[in-house]
Amino acid sequence: MKWLLLAVIVVTTVVSDLLQSRGMKIASGASETAPGLGRVLSLIGRRRDLALAIISLAISFFAFLALVQTQPLSFAVPASAGSFVLETILARMLLREKISSRRAMGALLVAAGIFLVAR
């Protein structure tokens, strides 16, 4: 059960973050300035991807609560960092972000840490 909960946490966190990034980039257009809280709340109501991001994040949160009920926090937090690795890969593939070699090495180190904690 712990691996299923962990998979739900990682996948829903990644989906949420990708949808948030995509939604906010589309909403901001060419503007480099950050929108205020009122504008963000308005965008959530108008942009389906932002609403889905919030739902995904809520699922991730409740799955994390379920995981820490049965597993030590020292396992749950590092293992759920798998989302960082997957997000880095998908940001490159889906969002066409440039990933520096330094950032890629950081993701690999996180993956190695997850492997060590999972054993």
Image: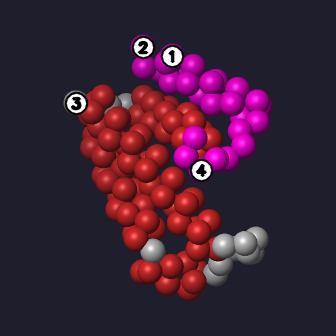
Sequence-wise, the earlier of marks 4 and 3 is 3
Q: Which residue is mark 4?
A: 95
Q: Which residue is mark 2?
A: 119
Q: Which residue is mark 3?
A: 1
Of 1 and 30, the residue lying toward us: 30
Q: Secondary structure at mark 3?
A: loop
Q: Amino acid at mark 3?
A: Met
**Vertical position of residue 47 compared to residue 2: above or below:** below
Q: Amino acid at mark 1?
A: Leu
Q: In this rendering, does residue 112 appear at all?
A: yes
Is the residue marked by circle 2 packed among few (<14), some (14-19), or many (20+) residues within 10 Å?
few
Q: Which mark is residue 116?
A: 1
**Vertical position of residue 117 compared to residue 6: above or below:** above
Mark 4 and mark 2: span between their CA atoms?
Answer: 33 Å
Q: Residue at x 51, y 16 (%)?
A: 116
Sequence-wise, the earlier of marks 4 and 2 is 4
Check residue 58 for magenta coloring: no
